[in-house]
Image: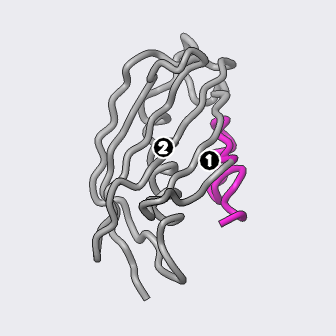
């Protein structure tokens, strides 16, 4: 899993300013991941506000990483089945944010996850929930 730190194994995460820094599994076996986000201008509209789809890319990656952290051996996520994203406050280029993805529940064929981006005052900026198809060995 260490190879997913930094850009999470996806170049686009680094291009939009995301950086995965920590991951683990809690006492209930649920995976989690944390990181920082300093949005770059490429992620924004002409007014400097981060586009909704960019939030979705970062949140999707955080949920995916969290689910994979909770899986054993060669088991991995295969695809995002469903995802809901909410933007609660605008995010701007050059401002610093943190994000966290968590596994809510692992079933045999799917993982239920959630992720949130918060600002420097710990106020939620965007959040997402998602369901991932699992590939189990």
Q: CA distance from mark 2 to mark 1?
A: 8 Å
On-image quarter of the N terminus: bottom right
Q: Which residue does the image show at 36% across and 52% down from the upper left?
A: 113
Res 16 quadrant in image: top right
Q: Position of residue 55 (x, y in %)?
A: 47, 34
Q: Position of residue 101 (x, y in %)?
A: 48, 46
In terms of sequence position, does the residue under pointer 2 or pointer 1 come before the other? 1
Q: Position of residue 130 (x, y in %)?
A: 32, 50
On-image quarter of the C terminus: bottom left
Residue nearer the viewer, 92 or 115: 115
Res 28 quadrant in image: bottom left
The residue beneath circle 1 is 12
Q: Secondary structure at mark 1?
A: helix
Q: Which residue does the image show at 58% across and 29% down from the upper left?
A: 43
Identify the magenta region: 1-21
Residue nearer the viewer, 92 or 44: 92
Is 25 above or below relative to 123? below
Q: Is residue 117 magenta?
A: no
Q: Which residue does the image show at 63% across and 19% down from the upper left?
A: 93
Q: Is residue 16 magenta?
A: yes
Question: Contact (CB < 8 A) between labels 2 and 1?
Answer: yes
Q: Which residue does the image show at 45% across and 51% down from the upper left?
A: 63
Structural crowding at the residue carrying mark 2, measured as other residues with C-alpha within 10 Å and reported as few (<14), some (14–19) or many (≥20): some
Q: Position of residue 131 (x, y in %)?
A: 30, 57
Is 1 above or below relative to 59? below
The residue beneath circle 2 is 57
Residue nearer the viewer, 73 or 79: 73
Q: Relative to 123, is 17 on the left or the right?
A: right
Is 25 above or below relative to 90? below
């Amino acid at each position: 899993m260490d190879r997913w730190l930094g850009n999470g194994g996806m170049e686009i995460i680094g291009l939009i300013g995301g950086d995965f820094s920590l991951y683990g599994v809690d006492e209930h076996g649920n995976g989690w991941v944390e990181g920082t986000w300093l949005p770059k201008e490429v992620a924004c509209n002409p007014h400097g506000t981060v586009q909704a789809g960019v939030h979705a890319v970062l949140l999707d990656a955080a949920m995916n990483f969290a689910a994979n952290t909770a899986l054993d051996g060669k088991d991995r996520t295969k695809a995002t089945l469903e995802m809901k994203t909410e933007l609660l406050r605008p995010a701007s280029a050059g401002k610093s944010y943190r994000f966290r993805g968590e596994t809510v529940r692992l079933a045999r064929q799917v993982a239920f996850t959630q992720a949130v981006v918060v600002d420097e005052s710990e106020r939620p900026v965007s959040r997402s929930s998602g369901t991932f198809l699992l590939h189990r060995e």
